[in-house]
Amino acid sequence: MQRFLITSPTFKGHIEALYDSNGRIFRMDFGKASDLSDEQLRGYKIRIPVIYDHMEEAFKDTKVKWEAADMEVTFQDFMREYPYKRNTHLAEAYWPTMTSSQQYQAFVAAITYRKYCERKKGWYTPMIPVKWLKTGEYKNNWSEL
């Protein structure tokens, strides 16, 4: 997982580009960028590369700056997506022991895990969150199960 913040003198704030573990674009967030015209927004959507290794080439000869940044996901973000709320205090105590990359990976996986649990409703009971985190269940691809 890789996160980039993109800034320019032509707008305030930053654009966030998130890339998955394969280096492919996962998400673009324009929510913290203001004063972007519709034309600029379309331009950035086209210019931000699909593969993060191409970031330098995408913005060469421009005034745009980009920098790698740590993933930022709070425990509350994770629990908002996680489908089971029992013993959350245990998971909250474990959360700071995880790296920011693991926290982000767990957050993204919690979204697909919730959908998995909804599909299996009636016969599958979700794990308590701390067990799910400690055993690395977030590393599974829940969308394919």
Image (cartoon, grey):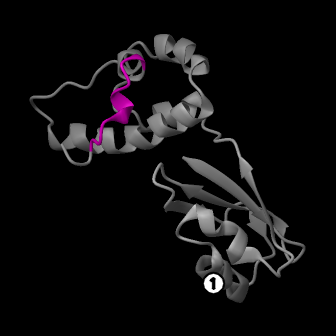
Q: Under tag 1, what secondary structure?
A: helix
> How many marks are shown on the rendered structure?
1
Q: Which residue lies furthest to the right in this view?
A: 9
Residue at the spot 85% in from the left edge and 67% down from the top edge: 12
Which amino acid type corresponds to the residue marked 1 in the rendered image?
Arg
Left or right, 8 with respect to 29, comes to: right
Residue at the spot 52% in from the left edge and 32% down from the top edge: 102
Left or right, 26 with respect to 135, comes to: right
Within the image, what quadrant is residue 58 found in?
A: bottom right
Q: In which quarter of the image is the C terminus?
A: top left
* Front residue (pair 77, 14): 14
- Horizontal and vertical percent for residue 29? 62, 62
Left or right, 97 with respect to 118, comes to: right
Residue at the spot 59% in from the left edge and 72% down from the top edge: 49
- Horizontal and vertical percent for residue 10? 86, 77
The residue that mark 1 highlights is 42
Left or right, 93 with respect to 86, comes to: right
- 31 shown above or below 81: below
Packing grade of label 1 (10 A; few <14, some 14-19, many >=20) is: few
Residue 141 on the magenta span: yes
Residue 103 on the magenta span: no
- Horizontal and vertical percent for residue 73? 60, 37
**Magenta-drawn segment:** 134-142
Within the image, what quadrant is residue 86 found in?
A: top left
Residue at the spot 48% in from the left edge and 16% down from the top edge: 91
